[in-house]
Structures are given as structure tokens and as C-alpha cells.
Amino acid sequence: MASLAANFTAFLFLFPAGLNRLLFSSSLYLKNPSVFRSKPWYFSDQRYKNFDLYFLIISLPIASFSELFFFLTFSGHPTFRFSFFMQSASLFLFWLLIIIIFFRETYDAFIVNESFAFLFLGISFLVEYSVVGKGIGGPLGGEAYNLLGELTLICAGACLVLSIKPTAFFAEFFLSCGLIFKGTWLLQTGFSLYTDTFAFKGCHKISPSTAKDFIESKCDLDKDGLRGVAFINLLFVAHAIAVFIGSVVLFGFLSSHKKLGRGEASGPLLAQLESDSSLMHPVPEFELE
């Protein structure tokens, strides 16, 4: 069920993952654009820096089984039951992808094509898109989650492009920024829709409707609802500008400082790219006579 806690938890998942991905991919691209190849996950040579991956491996199945438990026990409106089931399926798909990526990097015998991994990730985002905002009514909730659905489609499209052309840095950039944007927007939605403190003037936090078929955001007057929708769109534009400017500034900073702690990918991934580069562009040998 959507709530401030759920939105804040999603922010803790998505924002660091997107920022980490943007740092690694930008650093690799700037090192040698001609041999850049996007990866389903960017591993660090230091295990403690892969804490986010291990955290997802543990937390995603717990969240998935929790949603499945609600689906099995909730006897309310079919829309809620469908939403719980599809959310559980979406979380399970993301968890399965993380497991596949982990075993692929850990065991050489466990070979999974990277194009398949991106295709699988794109399908997972499409499954998530099918349940974004399900069971949430009202003008404010509907508009906020419609915008979230558009961000999910952008991530899905970027993954599908990378499944066909892993060297497309623009798709990698859109995927990274999309994850960051989804995280910040979920946090904004949590504060704006699920708290009275940050609610828009004349509107209240999301609560069960009188029919109890869904939850909705209620406003005292129609003009309050229209003003709230306008503010949501304004906030969305502000988030988009902030994420875009922040990403461009980060890319520019990396381009001027080729070495940046966490932003510089190292370890097996970089070694593999450098090996591929040497094979594609062999160094000529000269004999001294």
C-alpha cells in the first residue's frame, strides 16, 4: 500500500542506484568513448562499495512476499487485489534480475547475455508501469502517479534501447537520470500526498474513500484541486530541471577530473574494457635496424 514510508524506502533504493550508475557509466565513457559498453550493474573492486547490491538482494524478496501476503489476505476491491499481486510480481522480477547479475559476475560459468539482462529489466519496468497509481484516486494522486508512470516508461525505453545497442551512452544517461528522477519524485509525492504538513492549501493527505474501493486525495473546493494539480506539474518541472542540471554538472566535473574516487570505475570491469580496447586498437610494433 502506498504511504510515506513506502515512498521514502523507494527513494532510498532508486536515488543511490541511479547516482551510482551515472558516476560509473560517465567515468567509463569519458575514459574511452569508442569502447564504452553499458553494464546491467557496475561493480566496484571493493566489496563494501557493493553494499547497495547486497541490500537489494535481501530487501526485495521481503518486499515482494509482503505484497503477496496482502494479496492473499486482502478481501477488498478487486483493484486493490490486482495491484498487490502485480506489485509483488514486479518486485520479484527486479529481485530475480539482481540475482542473475550477481551470479553472472561471481561465477564465470553462469553466462547471461547482457542484452537479455537489459531486455528483462525493460520488461520489469513495463510490469511496474502497469500498476503505478492503481487504487489511488483524486486529482492530485492521479496526476502525481501519472507523471511517475511516464518516468517508468522512460526507464523501460532506455533499457530496451540498451538491449539492442549497449554502446548507446545516451540511453545509459537517460536510464541513470530516470532512476534518480523516480527517487526524488517518489519522495516529493510522499510528502505532498501522505502528510498534512506538506499538503497543498485546501487539500488533505490521501485517505480511504467513502466507498472504500480506493484511496484518494481530497480537496475542499474544486479550485483547490486545480491549484494543487498545477503545483504538482510545477514541482515535476522543477525536479526535472534540477536532475538535468545536476547530471550535466556531474558529467562536466568528471570530464575535467578523470580520477574521482567512487566515480571512477575500477577493478575487473575496467580491466575488461581496457583489454577490449587493446584488441580493437592494437599497438603497432617497430623494429630498430
Image (cartoon, rainbow, N blue to C red):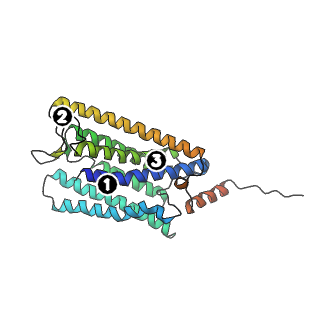
Amino acid type, callout 1:
Thr
Q: Earlier in the sequence, mark 1 or mark 3?
A: 1
Residue furthest to the front in view is: 197
**Near-viewer residue (273 or 204):** 204
Label 1–label 2 contact, CB within 8 A: no
Residue 63 location (% of width, % of height): 29, 61
Q: Residue at x 40, y 48 (%)?
A: 179
Left or right of residue 188, residue 276 in this image? right
Which label lies toward us, 1 or 2? 2
On the image, numbered disc 3 is attached to which residue? 161
Q: Residue at x 48, y 60 (%)?
A: 113
On the image, numbered disc 1 is attached to which residue? 9
Q: Residue at x 19, y 39 (%)?
A: 138
Crowding at dot 1, Cα within 10 Å, few <14 / some 14-19 / many 20+, comes out as: some
Task: Please indicate, yes or no, whether residue 163 appears anywhere in the rendered image.
Answer: no
Q: Residue at x 31, y 40 (%)?
A: 147
Does dot 2 land on a helix, a strand or a loop? loop
